[in-house]
Image (tube, rainbow, N blue to C red):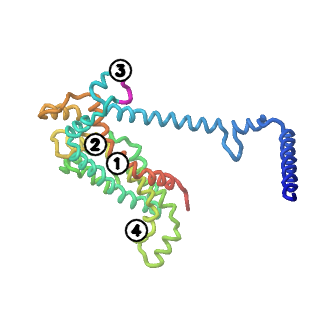
Amino acid sequence: MRQNRLEKKQSKANIKEQKAKAKALAKQGPRFTKEKVRKFLLGSKEKQGFIKVFCIYALLICIGFIYLNPIMQMISKSFMSLDDLLDSSINWIPSQLTISNYTQAAKSMDFWASLGKSIILAGVPTLCNLVSCSIIGYGLARFEFPGKKIVFGIIIMTFILPSQVTMIPTYVLYNKMEILGTVLPFILPPLLGSGLNAPIFILIFWQFFRQVPKVLIEAAQIDGAGYFKSFYRISLPSAVPAFITCGLFSFVWYWNESYLTEMYVVGVIQKSSWTSLVIQLDEFATNYNTYATTAASGATSINEAINMSGTMLSIIPLLIMYFFLQRYFVESIDKTGITGE
């Protein structure tokens, strides 16, 4: 009996609470007021509004579509057969995946040999760029000497000056040094701090080494460390983001460079054995026709799908590299923009 009474009292109390809540909600008026709608659309100090978020995401989607649409079209076309290319009803998804386009394009480009030479032509100058530009950037950040502003002006001027202006004198210089047709024209300038877009890397290292507290350098020197040891033990470990950023940019720029590679390394008058995937792509039509005439069987006439396959083969190594390093690359970009003492 007592339990029944307690249950009745609790149920009555719950009913009273529900009625009180209903009265409170009725006093508050309608749920959506002008102020709530305004905060939802325009936002407040604590939260961004719907209009701003919608505009940001719409802009990002449009920019992403502009960049991704050509790549998706290229991937789709590269797997199409000749019948799919001629069929107007097939636009994105091929009727069947044609892998032979890639095999024929790879054989005509001599893919594996060209890939190895491309890695050498892009990797070795990148390492030289990192070594020389980091040393130059550290020297400009840590030492005061007469003519420092003039050196900065020369570095900036070499970046502003178009490469076409110095192309012919540089070609004459390399010809007199008898290094044309070798990899040395891509190694010697980076070793001296004048590689491809080296002024950008010098300024990045200069800005980054300025962030390293001078107290750490002075403490290392008090403990007996010289200039080189303090640079190697104190400054370099903290400059990993700058190395990643400069390394990726330098590698991609050397990889995509075709004109200077063909002029200095491959050779204009007398061809050398050096080549790259980008050079093979420039000469893709000629190389494929030669391959098709010499192939015993299975080689078809060149078409858009085979052209797209060759283009994909030339950028796949960069896509794979960025896929594995993109997290470190984004973090490095953020850290190289931080200002310190």
Q: Position of residue 275 (x, y in %)?
A: 22, 44
**Tag 3, which secondary structure?**
loop
Q: Can you identify the residue that label 2 sits on?
A: 260
Residue mark closest to the camera, 3 vs 2: 3
Q: Which residues are magenta?
A: 88-93
In contact (CB < 8 Å): disc 1 and disc 2: yes
State how far apart marks 1 and 2 are (Cα). 10 Å
Q: Quadrant of the N terminus?
A: bottom right
The answer to whether residue 49 of the structure is visible from this angle is: yes
Q: Can you identify the residue that label 4 sits on?
A: 232
Q: Can you identify the residue that label 3 sits on?
A: 88
Q: Earlier in the sequence, mark 4 or mark 1?
A: 1
Q: Identity of the amino acid at label 3? A: Ser
Q: Quadrant of residue 276?
A: top left
Residue sitting nearer the eye, 225 or 287: 287
Q: Earlier in the sequence, mark 2 or mark 4?
A: 4
* Within-10-Å neighbours for mark 2: few <14, some 14–19, many 20+: some
Q: Identity of the amino acid at label 1? A: Leu
Q: Quadrant of the C terminus?
A: bottom right
Residue 196, which numbered label? Answer: 1
State how far apart marks 3 and 4 are (Cα). 62 Å
Q: Identity of the amino acid at label 2? A: Leu
- Depicted 285 relative to depicted 212: above or below: above
Residue drawn at (40%, 68%) of the image: 232
Q: Position of residue 55 (x, y in %)?
A: 60, 35
The answer to whether residue 175 of the structure is visible from this angle is: no
Q: Identity of the amino acid at label 4? A: Tyr
Residue sitting nearer the eye, 122 or 300: 300
State how far apart marks 3 and 1 are (Cα). 44 Å
State how far apart marks 4 and 1 are (Cα). 25 Å
State how far apart marks 2 and 4 are (Cα). 33 Å
Q: Earlier in the sequence, mark 3 or mark 4?
A: 3
